[in-house]
Amino acid sequence: MKILIITGASKGLGKAIATYYSKNSYQVISLSRSQSKELEGIRQIACDLSKLDEAEQIFRDTLKEVINSKPESITLIHNAGSLGEINTLENIPAQNIKATVTINYTAPLLLSSVFIKETEQLTIPRKLRTISSGAANGAYHGWSVYCSNKAAVDSFTRVIGIEQASAKNPAHAIAIYPGVVDTGMQTQIRNSSEGAFSNVERFKTMKENGDLASPESVAKLIYKIDTDSSINNGEIVDVRN
């Protein structure tokens, strides 16, 4: 029995990933604030990652149950994410900055820490996969919080790769750039004003030209990357490559 625990699987790319893994003989557990009637055969656990103490306890309980079931592998995919408010940094409220950083960076960092510690005595494959973004390597007007969050995600992925190198059974961590995917996040981007996000017309054009990838097609590529044993621990991988 292969287990996938994924955050933010109730919609968009997360839902597509959960569905694809389920069809490929994984027992999938979704940790999301909302539930989806379309996730047939997938266990859904209500979990608000913005409430760190509560989310940590829910994850610990879920992971303990998974470990006791004696699976053949455990994969954790950090998929939940938020652009937060798209605006120049000085115009983003403090509470929005805090909430966005918590969802995009603090929660994945915390859950990764728990995952590594609680599974370190296991002899089965232990895999950490974080959905990052090409924005980690770019500077987009109005995306100061999101870009910096994704850069931080890439950084902790590389560090995990280094730290786990000496482990008896290393947890294998990679970050994945999914490309530009046709999800609700893209809708939010296109609804931005040009004053808040100067590149908004480019994203509107991409939608009009059909240049956005479907969540289903990207989910298949993420699965292919996840199951590719040649990818090094701590590596950052772009689905478009």
Image (cartoon, rainbow, N blue to C red):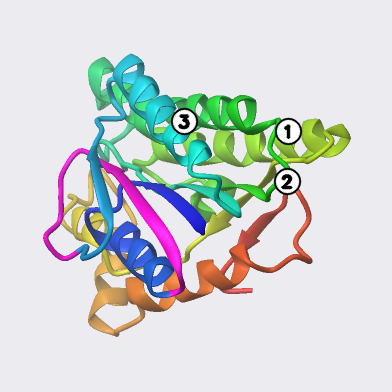
Answer yes or no: is residue 11 visible. Answer: yes
Q: Nearer the viewer, residue 156 or 115?
A: 115
Q: Residue furthest front?
A: 69
Q: Count the marks.
A: 3
Q: Residue at x 71, y 35 (%)?
A: 160
Identify residue type, mark 2: Gly
Q: Amino acid at mark 3?
A: Lys
Q: Is residue 97 above or below residue 186?
A: above
Residue 185 location (% of width, % of height):
26, 55
Secondary structure of residue under mark 1: helix
Residue 57 sits in which quadrant?
A: top left
Residue 100 located left or right of residue 3 = left
User: CA–CA distance between discs 1 and 3?
Assistant: 25 Å
Identify which residue is drawn at 28% across, 25% down: 50
Is 60 rendered above or below residue 224? above
79 magenta-colored: no
Tell me the distance, in whole angstroms, between the alpha carbons under discs 1 and 2. Answer: 7 Å
Q: As displayed, is residue 24 above or below residue 69?
A: below
Residue that badge 3 annotates: 64
Q: Sequence order check: which comes first, mark 3 or mark 2?
A: 3
- Magenta stretch in the rendered image: 24-38
Q: Amino acid at mark 1?
A: Val
The reply to whether discs 3 and 2 touch (Cβ–Cβ < 8 Å) is no
Q: Which residue is mark 1?
A: 159
Viewer-nearest residue: 223 or 155: 223
Verify CB contact (< 8 Å) between mark 1 and mark 3.
no
- Answer with the quarter of the image where residue 214 lies: bottom left
Sequence-first disc among 1 and 3: 3
Residue 200 % position (x, y): 27, 59
Viewer-nearest of discs 1 and 3: 3
Q: Circle 2 is placed at which residue position?
A: 234
3 or 2: mark nearer the eye? 3
